[in-house]
Image (spheres, rainbow, N blue to C red):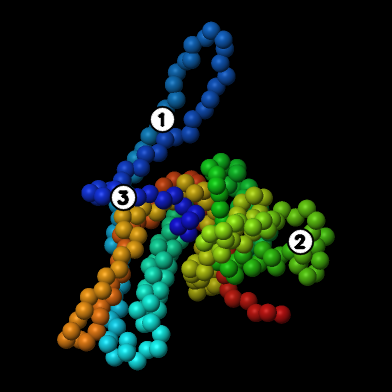
Amino acid sequence: MLGLVERMRLAKGAKSVTVPKVAQMTASALADGVDLGGSEDLGMTTTSLTTGEIGLKVILTDKLVRQENEDAFRIVGRQMGDAVARKKDRDVIALFSALNGGTDLGSAGRDMEIGNCSVLVAHSKANKFPSPVYIVHHPWATFHVALSFQGFAGGSAGGVPAAGAVMSTTNMGEGLLKNFWEFSVSGVPVYQDGNIDADASGDGIGAVFSREAMVYLESVGFNTEQQRDASLRGTEIVVTADYGCFELDDTYGAPVTFQVSAEATA
């Protein structure tokens, strides 16, 4: 998720950052020799953002390190880094449900089919979401988009899209995001994120949003320290980060509830 939202850096010595927002403006036709009348209202509002710390600790005993064939510090460090990354990802996902004033464009028990994806794209364009715009949902939700092509007019029973279908599989290029990119619908990329949780009914909340809808504010991205504990005969590994995830513009996104229950091969 961090690659799909705005990113800001909290300057050294600063406790918060103030983000301004101005209202949408309208340009008017002019007549030659006639002065501009009136002026646009900025409607400026500001939001103050700050960061908070997260972290975790692991103790590796000397005995464990001696008896482990692999590099225990490297293995544990990788897992701790993944834990911090998941925490950041989930913190952005937690913002989904409040977008669009909390008005969900999906519904419990509904599948994420190609027609529903097109509705999300139309909503983003009709409400003038600033580019770039993305759709993010659980892998089992995006699975139903491919599945829906089996019944697509002119498509084959094997799920091959019909001619003219608004689905693109253009390579996203190098980088982390390509590992989570599924396809695009009418020019809007669709990403999958397994950190979206299912509720008791098997539904999960994804979102359609502009990059400008949310922001990741970072003070310390990732910090690791080791401390020897002689009496415990081990080494403490502590990992911390200092950041915050916030909604910037409620009107530039919307939550989408779809089914995310696991499927079986057939």
Residue 101 in view of the camera: no
Question: What is the spatial separation of the Cα atoms under label 1 and label 2, in whole angstroms?
Answer: 47 Å
The image shows residue 66 at horizontal and vertical percentages of 32, 89
Residue at x-position 41% and y-position 85%:
70
Which badge, 1 or 3, comes first in the chain's sequence? Answer: 3
Question: What is the spatial separation of the Cα atoms under label 2 and label 3, in whole angstroms?
Answer: 46 Å
Q: Specify the farthest residue to the left.
A: 231
Kind of residue at disc 2: Pro
Secondary element at image label 2: loop
Which badge, 2 or 3, comes first in the chain's sequence? Answer: 3
Secondary element at image label 3: loop
| Residue 232 marker | none
Name the residue tied to disc 1. Answer: 42
The image shows residue 74 at horizontal and vertical percentages of 38, 77
Q: Nearer the viewer, residue 180 or 229?
A: 229
Residue at x-position 49% and y-position 54%:
4
Location of residue 179 by image quarter: bottom right
Tell me the crowding category of disc 2: few under 14, some 14 to 19, or many 20 or more residues within 10 angstroms, Cα based: many
